[in-house]
Image (cartoon, grey):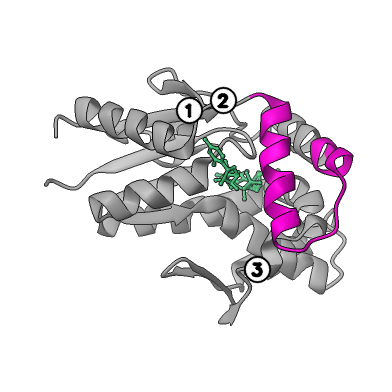
Amino acid sequence: MNRIAIAIDGPAGAGKSTISRLIAEKMGIEYIDTGAMYRAITLKLINKGVDISDIQKVKDIVNSTKVELVNGRVYLDEIDVTEEIRMPYVSAKVSDVAAIPCVRERLVHLQREMAKKTSVIMDGRDIGTNVLKDAEVKIYLTASVEERAKRRYIELKNKGIDVTFEEICNDIKNRDNIDTNREVNPLRKADDAVLVDTTGKSIQQVVDEIISIIKEGANL
Ligand code: CDP
Ligand code: CDP
């Protein structure tokens, strides 16, 4: 198989990471969760008590921070933060941090470097429109807000995290709003991306649908 890049974009809870991970396993390629990188930087800024309107401070921290994705785990300055970055207090701040241009500049650079080395499936908000504009296959995954919030609610409850459905719903709507309306590389479907609505579909159904889009799009 030639080197291939697959871009998966869409709003929170659409199923991007679940589906991308399964497809990466099936195809034997690398999965890169770009949202985890924005979450890791956000966690660092929270832990350091940084006022994110202090752009110079944010820039200094971002440029001296190590974020690595290794075997499905997320490392922030060599510490495993895989679980912590999913906590609601990080979700509540991540879209504001991700809207800061110097944060995006640094992370987009790292993401492109990762994709140079090997075949990848990369998920996020601006992969098809910006990070990997030349990706062989682009998918825009979505689902209704209610379904996305329900999925996230069940997921957090199963992990024993205490949240209400309203809190999750508000977080998702708030992030959708910031991600879609920010100035730098907002969330939107690339013109050449295939739209897949996952509302009411099982994970397996979505995986099968996307595998056939990949086969067709990449001539596999
Ligand atoms: O998993 P979930 O959909 O909740 O979010 P995520 O993929 O972990 O991304 C968290 C946040 O990072 C998003 O709400 C965006 O604000 C930001 N993000 C971004 O701006 N660009 C990306 N390529 C990926 C994530
Ligand atoms: O990465 P993103 O925020 O787009 O979504 P996710 O974290 O992969 O998925 C959110 C939750 O929805 C997970 O708990 C999945 O098991 C569940 N789910 C799904 O991903 N796809 C479906 N078709 C149905 C449920």
Which residue bears the numbered disc 1? 140
| Circle 3: residue type | Glu
Q: Is residue 29 visible?
A: yes
Sequence-wise, the earlier of marks 1 and 3 is 3
Do the CB atoms of the residues marked 1 and 3 lie less than 8 Å apart? no
**Looking at the picture, how far across and down is residue 80, in whole percent?**
59, 78
On screen, residue 136 versus residue 160, left or right, reads: left
Q: Is residue 181 visible?
A: no
- Per the rendered image, the range of residues in magenta is 144-170
* Magenta stretch: dominant secondary structure: helix
Is 147 a magenta residue?
Answer: yes
Depth check: 9 or 113 in front? 9
| Circle 2: residue type | Gly
Q: Gap in Å between the C-alphas at discs 2 and 3?
A: 27 Å
Which residue bears the numbered disc 2? 200
Instruction: Specify few, some or many for label 2: CA neighbours under 10 Å numbering under 14, 14-19, or 20 or more.
Output: few
Residue at the image point whose x is 13% and y is 46% from the top:
2
Which one is closest to the eye, mark 1 or mark 3?
A: 3
**Looking at the picture, how far across and down is residue 30, in whole percent?**
33, 57
